[in-house]
Amino acid sequence: MNFLNRYSNIIEKEVFDLVLPKQPANLYEPLKYFLKLGGKRIRPILTLLAGEIFGAKTEDLIKAALAVELFHNFTLIHDDIMDKAPLRRNQETVHERWNSSIAILAGDVLFVKAYEVLGTCPENFLKNLFSIFSKTAREVCEGQQMDMDFEEKSSVTEAEYLEMIRLKTSVLLGCALEMGAIMGNSSEKERQNIYNFGIHIGLAFQIQDDILDLFGDPEKVGKQIGGDVICNKKTLLSIIAKSKANEVDLKLLNSLQLDENLEFKIKTTANLYERLGVRDYCEQKMIDHYNTSINYLNKIENNYSKKKLINLANYLLNREY
Amino acid sequence: MNFLNRYSNIIEKEVFDLVLPKQPANLYEPLKYFLKLGGKRIRPILTLLAGEIFGAKTEDLIKAALAVELFHNFTLIHDDIMDKAPLRRNQETVHERWNSSIAILAGDVLFVKAYEVLGTCPENFLKNLFSIFSKTAREVCEGQQMDMDFEEKSSVTEAEYLEMIRLKTSVLLGCALEMGAIMGNSSEKERQNIYNFGIHIGLAFQIQDDILDLFGDPEKVGKQIGGDVICNKKTLLSIIAKSKANEVDLKLLNSLQLDENLEFKIKTTANLYERLGVRDYCEQKMIDHYNTSINYLNKIENNYSKKKLINLANYLLNREY
């Protein structure tokens, strides 16, 4: 993905050049540490690409793109505390390396920094940029809360699950894209189209993530298979399985939840999901959202930059291109 | 303080009327609960009063005032987690009533809400409003981190302590005032004067808080005396005491830190602080900052609303007026 590298290098440089005070060291060191853990920088790249489509200036776009990336990292630091996650990108999480109080505050100040950077965008765009950014930030919090609530709930519907991943993941992709469109002075209609492209690519990506966790190639996925099954996590797969299972299958699903033979648990769950048509169903859902996203993109007048967004979508969804 | 009631009622109504979604209930219920705990709403009142001085429109001011109050409440929710505080205004804190994850997220979404409300201010003020608001929010985080760092440090200088309370408390008062001035189209110079009024009133107030904790009238202060001494908290008093103490007094101070007879500990500390001139020193510091604050206010052309700010300052510092 040569063209992606060029964009991610732009973002990487911005993140690297971000001026942060030295003191208090316990506030800013954790932040610098976390930002250096890297990542694919997909969200800010979306802002750059969307801005290109609508003819926005790169120097304007970069600030908004950086704000999106900083916000995303803020959510990761706080989510890691809530999820008690020990690792992020194979490195210690902030609350693990320092402590929870420091991680809360590092997240808070990163969130401020995101707004501060966004505030350096040209004045005529600020109202719209702040509006979509704040709405999105609020929705991401709602998504995280729904996700936490699901852990306690005995049953979650497909609609609830899709709403959760829309809020937790998709809206930020939509926002990243729409901010690019805003700075390209696009119409309300075009803003909606590019936003919806992001929503559905996000849904497709998240559903794919659920599928790959159980059915992916461990080497390609880069992590052990079946993590969600091991910890009985509610995913689109498990929700659909429950809805498709007859009484006997339900009993099997319930007993598998308690099974301590993990290899058996994963293999049997995978087989059952295949037999119940869960995998096919979810793959079709993923394809549907992918197609919907491309349809939204096609409503926007064609040009070279749009092709890049399609390439990025295909890259995210591991497709040939 | 009749004139204050009128302003605090305006704010109370705004807080009460704040539209928050019903779902996810675990996100928004804790928030509604916390906002209902009340408070003196000093910060948003400062915005309203400063705006009056500079002739800003009330309907514009209210949004910025509400944003300041929401931001302040966000910091309280997160500070309570970090401080492991069980109570806030005699009611359970959010992390105590629900849990830390919910409190982190309730704080986050309240912070977003603050920005969202600020974004509804007139477009021509947004750049300046967001700029001072984000700078202040960042500084408040820095102040909280310094405060946490002090717990681990063996010694803290007077300058470090004053910088900590400036960041943790004063800058938000300054920001609240300056936002009112911004919406009154005041000059840069006037913005600085009103901001500095807030900084020094904040310092005076916080120093007074330290003094009252040990030397206040329990009935007027509304809490038990000596709380800071009991938990060996670093305050301006303890820092000055250490700097004024000779070897013998230092030994006494150190042994008092470990003393389990709390009544004796408080009384002996208070006597020692009196004898060392700590109380006088701190009271003079407080008066100095009060006078400095009034000097800054006097640089602004006189009018009726300015008198209200002086009344508010006197009210905060328990003075006759």
Image (tube, coloured by chain):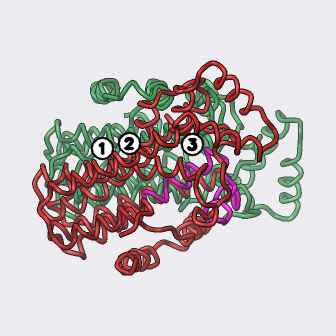
Chain colours: A red, B green
- Closer to us: A285 or B175: A285
Let me know if marks 2 and 1 both belong to one chain.
no
In the image, residue B91 sits, relative to residue B112, either above or below, namely: above
On screen, residue B42 versus residue B123, left or right, reads right
In the image, residue A170 sits, relative to residue B263, either above or below, namely: below
Q: Residue at x 33, y 48 (%)?
A: A200
Q: Chain for mark 1?
A: B
Dot 3 or dot 1: first in sequence order is 1
**Residue A145 in view of the camera:** yes
Within 10 Å of disc 3 (Cα), the crowding (few <14, some 14-19, many 20+) is some
Q: Which residue is mark 3?
A: B209
Q: Which mark is residue B116?
A: 1
Identity of the amino acid at label 3?
A: Asp
Let me know if marks 3 and 2 both belong to one chain.
no
Identity of the amino acid at label 1?
A: Glu
Which element type, helix, strand or loop, lies under badge 3?
Answer: helix
Residue B15 image position (x, y, % from top left)? 34, 29
Identity of the amino acid at label 2?
A: Arg
Give the alpha-carbon distance from disc 3 to disc 1, as whole Å: 32 Å
Is disc 2 in contact with disc 1, using a CB cutoff of under 8 Å? yes
Instruction: Tell me the quarter of the picture where residue A121 sits.
Output: bottom left
Give the alpha-carbon distance from disc 3 to disc 2, as whole Å: 35 Å
Quadrant position of the N terminus of chain A in the picture? bottom left
**Is residue B13 highlighted in magenta?**
no
- Closer to us: A205 or B299: A205
Q: Which residue is mark 2?
A: A138
